[in-house]
Amino acid sequence: MDRLLLIDDETDLHYSFQRLFASDDLEIATATSGEEGLRLLKRFKPDLVLLDIRLGGMNGLEVLRRIRMTDARLPVILMTAYGGTQTAIEAMKLGAYDYLLKPFDVPQLREVVARALRASRAMRQRVAVEPEVDAEDVELGLVGRSQAMQSVFKLVGQVAVSDATVLITGESGTGKELVARAIYQHSLRANQPFMAINCAAIPENLLESELFGHEKGAFTGATAQRIGRFEQCHRGTIFLDEIGDMPLATQTKILRVLQSGTFQRVGGGETLQVDVRVLAATNQDLERAVAERRFREDLYYRLNVVRITLPPLRERPEDIPLLAGFFLRQQARDPRHGAKSLSAEALEALQQYAWPGNVRELENAIRHAVVMARGDTILPEDLPREVLKGGKTPGGRDEAAKAAPAAADTGAKPAVAEAEPGRPGVAKPDETVAELGQRLFAWARAHPDLPVLPAVERELVRQALLATRGNQVQAARLLGITRATLRKRIERFGLRSEIRFE
Ligand SMILES: Nc1ncnc2c1ncn2[C@@H]1O[C@H](COP(=O)(O)OP(=O)(O)OP(=O)(O)O)[C@@H](O)[C@H]1O
Ligand SMILES: [Mg+2]
C-alpha cells in the first residue's frame, strides 16, 4: 500500500483528503506543521508528500529543502492558494515534483497524486538484475538465462556506474523501461531523482516546455513561468521514453543538453546549466528514422554510444519457463489467486507461441490464466485463446508474428474474445460471455467472498483502456458506454494509476 504524508495546518483539509482517497489503496498520515511533518518522515516513511507552502512555524519551502536533504528521491507536491507566485516557481527549482493550486480541482489532484506515486515507485521498487526466481521478496526483476539476456545484464552492470547516455532499443514489451530503471538503481545517482518522460504521450507543442520549462508569455497560454523536468531533476536521471517520437525541434535542444549540459527555457534568454544523466528508449527503427530525416543524425550518434538492444521473446524461448515461473510467483502472492504451477502442456503451449507482445504479453497471459484456472495447476485451456491458436497451427509462430503490430499495441487481449464470424457456436458475443460466465462462477465458488460482477466490470474497463492505450473516446465506444460513464468507472475502480493515458 502506498503512503502519503499531508502537511497542512488546515485540519479540514486532512478530513477531505481522508475522504477523497478512502477507496484508494493509500495510507494517509497528516501533520499540521513542518516540524511535525519532518518528524513523521522517519517514522511513517511516506512514498509521497503533499506540502502546503504557507505554514505556521517553518515555512513550506524550508520543509521542502530539508526533505530534499534527507531523501532527494521522495516526491513532494507543493500546495498553494496563491497561483503562479514566485514561491511555487522557487519550489520547482528546489526539486518539488509539482505544485497544485487551492482550491483543488479534484480530478487534477488525483491525477497528479497518481503520477507522483508512479514516479515514486519507479525510484524505489528494486529492480533486481537476475533475481533468484524463487525469491519471495523480489518485486521487479530482470529475468533471463538466454545468452542474449546475459549480455544485456552484463551491459547494464557496466554502464550503470558511468554517466554515459544509454540508448535502449527493442520491440514493445521487451523490458526497455525495466532496464532503464535497473541502470538508474545501480548507478551512483541512485539516491537522486529518476524521472521518466514519455515523449509520445505528450503533445508536440508541450513537450519542449515539459522538458525545459518556459517563461511567462512564451506562447499563448503560458501565463506563468514554468520549471521544466531537466531543471527539476538536477543531479538525477531522466529517462526519455519513446525518443523516436520526439519532434525535430526538441531533438535539437536535447542534443545541446547532452553535449554541454546547457539549455534555455522556451521563450527565455538565460542559459541554464544542469547535471542530468539521460537514458533513452524507443521501439522504432532509429536508423530508418535518420534515413527518413525524422531523427537527427548527430543526436542518433550521440545517443548510440552505448546501446542496449533487447531481443524479442521469440528469439529466446529458453527464457519463457523462467519468466512464466517468475510471473506466476508474483501472482501467487495475492491470496485470492490459487494457481501455483503450470502443467507441462500449458508450458509447452507457452513455448510454442510467438509472443508478438513480448514479455508484457506473457505477463498478461499468466495473469489471465491464474484467474481462469480452477485448481492449483494452470492447464492449456486457461491460457488466452490466441496463445493456444498460435501453438497449434503449423507455422503458428510466423502467423502470430505477422499479427505482431496489432497485438503488440494492446499488450493484452480482452478476457471476452471478439466474436469470430463464420465459426458456429462462438459467432455471437453472448455465447462467448456465457462460456466465460461458467468459468467465472467456478472461480467464484472457490472464493465466495469476492464480488464477481464488479471484478468483471473493472477488468473489462481496464482491458478496453489497455486496448486503446488509454484513449477514453475509443474505450467508451468499445464498451458501449458514454465517456462520462467511463470516467466514473475509471475513478470508482481506481484505474487511473494503472493505465497510461494518452
Ligand atoms: N526480463 C524481464 N524479466 C521480468 N519482467 C520483465 C522482463 N522484461 C520485461 N518484463 C516485464 O514486462 C513488462 C513490459 O516491460 P517494459 O514496460 O519494460 O517494456 P518496454 O520495452 O518498455 O515496452 P514498450 O515499448 O511497450 O513501452 C513489464 O511489466 C516488465 O516488468
Ligand atoms: Mg516502455
Image: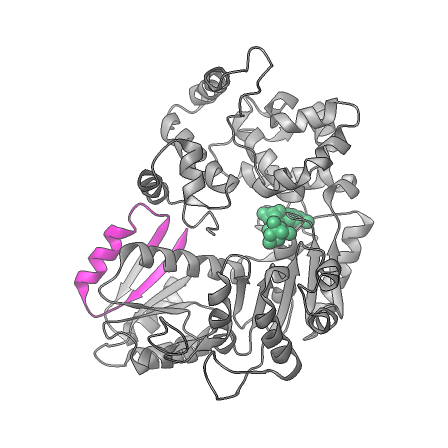
- What's the colour scheme? one colour
User: Is residue 224 magenta-colored?
Assistant: no
Magenta highlight range? 1-27
Q: Tell whether 271 sits left or right of 82.
A: right
Residue 439 screen position, x and y as percent: 50, 19
From this view, report whether residue 84 is shown above or below residue 2: below
From this view, report whether residue 101 is shown above or below residue 355: below
Q: Residue furthest right?
A: 147
Task: Tell me what residue is drawn at x 66 percent, y 29 percent.
Answer: 387
Residue 143 screen position, x and y as percent: 69, 48
Q: Residue furthest bottom?
A: 270
Q: Tell whether 216 sits left or right of 164.
A: left
Q: Residue furthest top?
A: 424
Residue 248 screen position, x and y as percent: 61, 69
139 or 484: nearer the eye?
484
Is residue 138 visible in the rendered image? The answer is no
Task: Tell me what residue is drawn at x 47 percent, y 52 percent.
Answer: 502
Task: Tell me what residue is drawn at x 55 percent, y 31 percent.
Answer: 368
Is residue 238 visible in the rendered image? The answer is yes
